[in-house]
């Protein structure tokens, strides 16, 4: 079984749910919380509770106990999690890797849509980001990963405690990556309200969903172009407002849901709705590697990983740590990066001449160029930085001409050099 605490998966092998003839009390694993009735699992506030179905019967003795339990769970998780292919070991696909790194440096870029052939490592690359994600401050025990300093990222309860002047227990935890399965129900994504408790006790009992867990983290949707329309509507709503509102039986509960939206898919399996496509800050195109030597290297590296994941990960440990340090440095350096007024005007001129709808293209291009400059350790954006990121920021925002044979990314580059020359 797997329980979830904060941002990490904890592999726990509980003893079987059983009861002896002499006692009606079931036998539980030491890390399980006491619950009632038959065997099962229930998620409460981001904590996967193993044992028996029913309402959990536990209380937190003190803030110190709560913080210690979080740290213990994170330590167990880091030792027992399923091995992930190292990001530094991925061969080629530089465009996709750059887009992902820029979004980690500046989450306000708005995510990335990765489209390409099947079997080109899209999902592997996205999931390999887990090792590189930096740590953030969160309020201990809060199901929404509330920021203890920024009211925009606080849940309602945490904000009320802040206004009262309460001291908030704070822990450091890695940015969370949440997978959104294609078959997920709307209740599982948005969360649901416990109607029985609301009617009998008169309180709003809310069970958070995947959007709550993804707040201040990454929400990854594989095969996003196959996602059901009703879930697409939910994502559009949350991505637009940054909040998720659940309406059930006259009860309304809202919580922050600001996340980096990452999607991947194969264009042969269907197009994405324009409204959702526009919500992705950047768009990366992935192609199959044609070079024979590179293909052999990829196959050999994958075989090494499958044979001994731990040894393979250890061989890339220094490169991973170097990349982590580079990301951490860029995030702290980002606020000091400047972009000249002349470059801003030329960037907007490119967007205008390409007939890009709205201003998202201008905003995202400026943000991505700054993040790239920070990644390179510079405090000033150059025209070269803009040239690198502008195809990924505008490609998916162009109006499609069915008679046009040129790739939209090439159209953007041509217009860029025409304006910037």
Image (tube, rainbow, N blue to C red):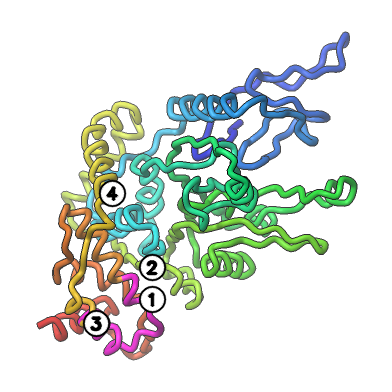
Location of the C terminus (image quadrant): bottom left
Q: Which residue is found at the position 46% from the left and 52% from the top?
A: 218
Query: Is 172 left, or right, of 193 in this rendering?
Result: left
The residues colored magenta run: 346-364
Residue toward you, 51 or 222: 51
Disc nearer the start of the sequence (2/1): 2
Q: Residue at x 74, y 61 (%)?
A: 252
Camera-near label (1 vs 4) is: 4
Instruction: State which quarter of the image contains the N terminus.
Output: top right
Task: Indicate whether 50 appears above or below 274.
Answer: above
In the image, taking residue 392 as reference, residue 244 lies left or right, namely: right
- Kind of element beneath mark 4: helix
Q: Is residue 224 magenta?
A: no
Q: Point out which mark residue 281 bears.
A: 2
Earlier in the chain: of badge 2 and badge 4, it is 2
Q: Position of residue 319 (x, y in %)?
A: 22, 38
Q: Label 3 vs label 1: CA separation?
A: 18 Å
Q: Main secondary structure of the magenta part?
A: helix
Above/below status of 57 relative to 135? above
The residue beneath circle 1 is 360
Pointer 4 residue: 332
353 drawn magenta:
yes
Q: Earlier in the sequence, mark 3 or mark 1?
A: 1
Q: Nearer the viewer, residue 85 or 300?
A: 85
Where is residue 2 drawn, in percent x and y? 58, 33
């Amino acid at each position: 079984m797997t329980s979830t605490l904060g941002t990490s998966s904890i592999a726990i092998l509980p003893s079987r749910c059983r009861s002896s003839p002499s006692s009606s009390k079931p036998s539980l694993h030491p890390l399980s919380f006491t619950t009632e009735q038959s065997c099962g699992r229930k998620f409460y506030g981001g904590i996967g509770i193993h044992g028996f179905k029913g309402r959990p019967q536990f209380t937190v003795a003190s803030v110190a106990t709560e913080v210690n339990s979080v740290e213990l769970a994170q330590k167990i998780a880091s030792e027992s999690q399923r091995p992930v292919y190292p990001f530094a070991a991925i061969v080629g696909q530089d465009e996709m890797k750059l887009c992902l790194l820029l979004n980690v440096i500046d989450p306000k870029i708005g995510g990335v849509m990765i489209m390409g052939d099947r079997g080109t490592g899209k999902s592997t690359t996205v999931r390999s980001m887990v090792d590189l994600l930096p740590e953030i401050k969160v309020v201990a025990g809060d199901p929404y990963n509330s920021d203890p300093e920024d009211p925009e990222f606080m849940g309602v309860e945490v904000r009320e405690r802040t206004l009262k002047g309460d001291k908030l227990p704070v822990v450091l935890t890695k940015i969370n990556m949440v997978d959104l399965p294609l078959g997920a129900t709307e209740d599982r994504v948005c969360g649901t309200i416990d109607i029985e408790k609301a009617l009998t006790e008169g309180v709003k009992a809310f069970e958070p969903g995947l959007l709550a867990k993804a707040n201040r983290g990454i929400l990854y949707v594989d095969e996003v172009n196959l996602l059901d329309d009703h879930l697409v509507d939910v994502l559009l709503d949350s991505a637009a407002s940054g909040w998720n509102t659940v309406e059930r039986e006259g009860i309304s509960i809202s919580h922050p849901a600001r996340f980096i939206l990452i999607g991947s898919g194969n264009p042969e399996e269907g197009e994405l709705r324009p409204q959702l496509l526009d919500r992705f800050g950047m768009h990366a195109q992935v192609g199959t590697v044609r070079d024979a030597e590179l293909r052999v290297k990829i196959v050999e590296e994958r075989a090494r990983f499958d044979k001994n994941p731990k040894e393979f990960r250890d061989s890339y440990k220094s490169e991973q740590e170097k990349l982590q340090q580079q990301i951490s440095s860029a995030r702290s350096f980002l606020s000091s990066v400047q972009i000249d007024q002349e470059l801003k005007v030329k960037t907007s001129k490119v967007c205008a001449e390409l007939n890009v709808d709205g201003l998202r293209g201008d905003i995202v291009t400026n943000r991505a160029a700054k993040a790239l400059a920070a990644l390179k350790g510079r405090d000033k954006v150059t025209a070269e930085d803009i040239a690198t990121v502008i195809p990924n920021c505008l490609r998916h925002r162009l109006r499609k001409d069915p008679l046009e044979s040129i790739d939209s990314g090439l159209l953007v580059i041509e217009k860029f050099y025409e304006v910037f020359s």
